[in-house]
Amino acid sequence: MALNDNTPAGTGHVGTLTPDQTKTLQKLWAALYEIQEKGTVTVVPEVKAVPEPEPAPAAGGWGSGWFTAAAPAAPVVEAPVTITLSELGLTAADVRTGVWSNTLGDHPDSLVLRFLRARKWHVANGLLMLLNAIKWRLEQDVENVKVLGDEELDVKYPKFQQQLQVGKFYIHGTDKSGQPVVYLNVHLHYSSDQDPKTLERLTIYLMETGRLLIQSPVETVALVFDLTQFGLSNMDYSLVQFLVKCFEAYYPESLGTILIHNAPFVFWGAWKIIEPWLDPVVASKIKFTYKDQELLDLIPAEHLPDSFQGVGKDKYKYEYLPPVAGENDLMKDEATKGTLLAERHALTEKYDAKTKEWIASGSETASPDREALAKELHTQYYKLEPYIRARSQYHRKNSTGKSIVQPDGTVVWTYNN
């Protein structure tokens, strides 16, 4: 599916791939399968053609310069790259589980394409980035953040729930491109108020929860860092570094826009430290805004909370929705969970088989059966999800009886204009 009806071919998303991009996607899938089967894979890069050089300026005489063809440049040949799972500290089971647990209800190609786009369509670099992300998810026990409920996370990571209650961050509505908008109220944060490990867990929780709120064909979120009332005591360099690393290395191509809003003079000293940490791609997505009116370039007034006075029309006030008794009872139903997990495993094996057939065929277009399986995996994931993942406040019903994330995975935002 294209990002929208006007999205041109070649943007690197599902439904917009050029023939060359499709071929590269097939190569990365093939490398993923080979490294699982053999424990190692050698990726042979494509020979890159280089543009013809400009003729050299005339050095004198009729037989040189503009009237003599320059020597053709040799094509760029990269050395083959060998990647071995044991050297990365991974097993084949780690890779397969890592890929499918990270796919959620998305099209499986969507996950792989994120890493390819982030590494400029270089198969070996994209594969290595994906494998390192899988390793990081294991080391950080990301699945545990999804399995534990808010109260359990609070026991394990002191003051975790307090971060949610005070509204340091919240996700509300979408921007003009359909991206969920994450608002970060920086003036509410003091690094000394909680353990750094709690903040890391909170960041991962934000990443994983935010993914549930991204609706295909959109694949990214927008961040609004609201620096109103910011002081140097609110600055937390370690947290910023962790957040930057997450977006760049472990959740690539998931960040669409960053607005740094209403930054006071004292922030610029901190910015001089932060800016060199940023990948150029991430840095290019940052825009500084100083007046609330400027937020309307990104967010419709009807979606913007009226706390941005004079421009926001949505009468929205963040309120944490606490856990509801029994909301995770389905996770205790081992029999149904087992049945659904077996069903998903069978579907993923069928998808892998159809993908291997597609690779072997060399066809630019995947088979209808493969695409049908992708849709079936999407539907089946949301049947399975309440048995393997704790409910968040975005699943819970508010005072009007409405929830944001629906049982089938669709997202419904409510605006009060």
Image (spheres, rainbow, N blue to C red):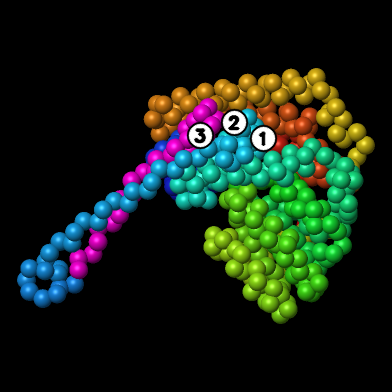
Q: Say what amino acid the circle numbered 3 marks.
A: Thr
Depicted 349 relative to depicted 302: above or below:
above
Distance between the Cα atoms at labels 3 and 1?
22 Å
Q: Can residue 197 be seen here?
A: yes
Report whether 359 appears left or right of 282: left
Name the spot of residue 44 as percent of width and height, x first. 39, 40
Which residue is at a point 74% across and 39% down the rendered structure image?
Answer: 143
Report whether 85 appears left or right of 202: left
Depicted 139 relative to depicted 64: above or below:
above
Span shown in magenta: 28-56
Residue designated by label 1: 101
Examine the structure image and report whether residue 76 is included in the region drawn in magenta: no
Which residue is at a point 68% across and 52% down the rendered structure image?
Answer: 180
Quadrant in the picture for residue 244 = bottom right
Mark 1: secondary structure: helix
Label 3 neighbour load within 10 Å: few <14, some 14-19, many 20+ = some
3 and 2 marks in contact (CB < 8 Å): no
Mark 2: secondary structure: helix
In the rendered structure, find residue 394 and report the number of the disc placed on it. Answer: none
Q: Say what amino acid the circle numbered 1 marks.
A: Ser
In the rendered structure, find residue 40 and report the number of the disc placed on it. Answer: 3
Label 2 neighbour load within 10 Å: few <14, some 14-19, many 20+ = some
Distance between the Cα atoms at labels 3 and 2?
10 Å
Which residue is at a point 79% across and 29% down the rendered structure image?
Answer: 387
Q: Quadrant of the C terminus?
A: bottom right
Quadrant in the picture for residue 317 = bottom right
Residue designated by label 2: 92
In the rendered structure, which disc, 3 or 2, sits on the residue that comes first in sequence?
3
In the rendered structure, which disc, 2 or 1, sits on the residue that comes first in sequence?
2
Label 1 neighbour load within 10 Å: few <14, some 14-19, many 20+ = few
Which residue is at a point 56% across and 26% down the rendered structure image?
Answer: 351
